[in-house]
Image: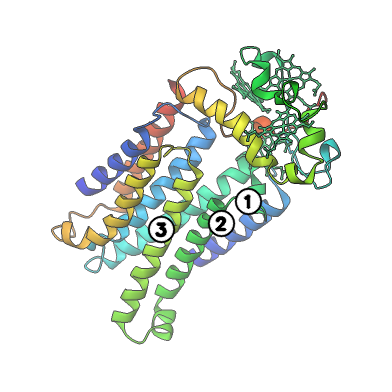
Amino acid sequence: MMRAVLLAGVIALVALAVLGSPWPGEHPERARYYDSPEPILPMRFDHPSHATVNCLTCHHEFVDDSGNDTCMSCHVRRPELAAQLEAQFHGLCRDCHVDRNASGDAGGPPRACVACHVIDGKI
Amino acid sequence: MRFLVGATVALLTLTLVVHPLLGGGVLWDLGNAIGLLALAGVLTLFAPGQFPRTPRRHQQLANAVLLMLLAHALWFPLTDAASHVYLLPGAPTYMWLGVAGFVVLLVAWQLSLPGSRQRWHASPASFRRWHRRLGMLAIILAAGHITLSGFYLGSPWQAAVFMVLVIAAPLLARSITPRLTDSGAPTVTQTVSVWLLACVAFVALRNLA
């Protein structure tokens, strides 16, 4: 009995990992967003809810010599940046949300993947 | 029973010391509470009051722990449609540590069934030795999974205290809990009730404030 339950659970887990969730709602899947050479998850971003954040916190390209382009055109298309996409963007976006949540201030989503990884027509 | 309540409260308190109000949303915190309590369950399995005097309790609790881990693992890819990528190649190391810990427990469970116990072990003593080693390995992998993911145990010293506690607890269990008699060991119903309350407290604190 226990073995059957465990076996069914493990099979369900593998199926979920490969096929994604059958639950209703958004189902972001990896694809070649932002002309990425590799399939990646989509993201969403909204400037008005970040009105309290200094532009330069994110737009380092305004002041440094990295060039003038959209974030994604550099970070997704340049291989050396694409390799660090997750680490750098989670470090920028998610860590700020975590810090604000932890200190009791309004912040964006600190964990839920679907809160950020959905298609956003504007980016 | 007192041991169970004590261990559960200690574990929850430790996760609350640095950022008590940092929540990932009700669904995320609930899924993680189940995982943390499953680890508390693995630690409890090392208490001699559970074994060998009451092998049935030990087996029931072990089954409950495996079901909780399954629930913890299925929870995220079900409720958060983007999270399943963390079970695919390219996922962070701490996710593979979690998967490995689960697999080790499944192996320990399979090897303890009457048939395989004799087939794979030379003697009852060698079974017990290996059973305990696999349990320790699973605890170390799970502790890595929890601390490296770095959400509830955000500061390095908190992660260090956690590591020391979860590794020391099973090693010390036999010397600190020999007085747990059969009647002192909580039943599965008591265990599950205490843990349900703990889940509610953990999630409520982090999301209602």
- Element assignment for label 3: helix
B140 left or right, relative to A79: left
Residue identified by numbered label 3: B140
- The chain that hosts pointer 3 is B
- Residues under numbered marks 1 and 2 in contact, where contact means CB atoms less than 8 Å apart: yes
In primary-sequence order, the first of circles 1 and 2 is 1
Residue B49 in sight here: no
Q: Amino acid at mark 3?
A: Ile
* Cα distance between the residues tagged 2 and 3: 13 Å
Query: In which chain is the residue bearing label 1?
Result: B
Q: Identify the residue under disc 1.
A: B91
Q: Quadrant of the C terminus of chain B?
A: top left
Name which quarter of the figure residue B157 lies in.
top left
Q: Relative to residue A122, is residue A4 depicted above or below?
A: below
Instruction: Judge left or right: residue B61 versus residue B102.
Output: left
Closer to the N terminus: mark 2 or mark 3?
Answer: 2
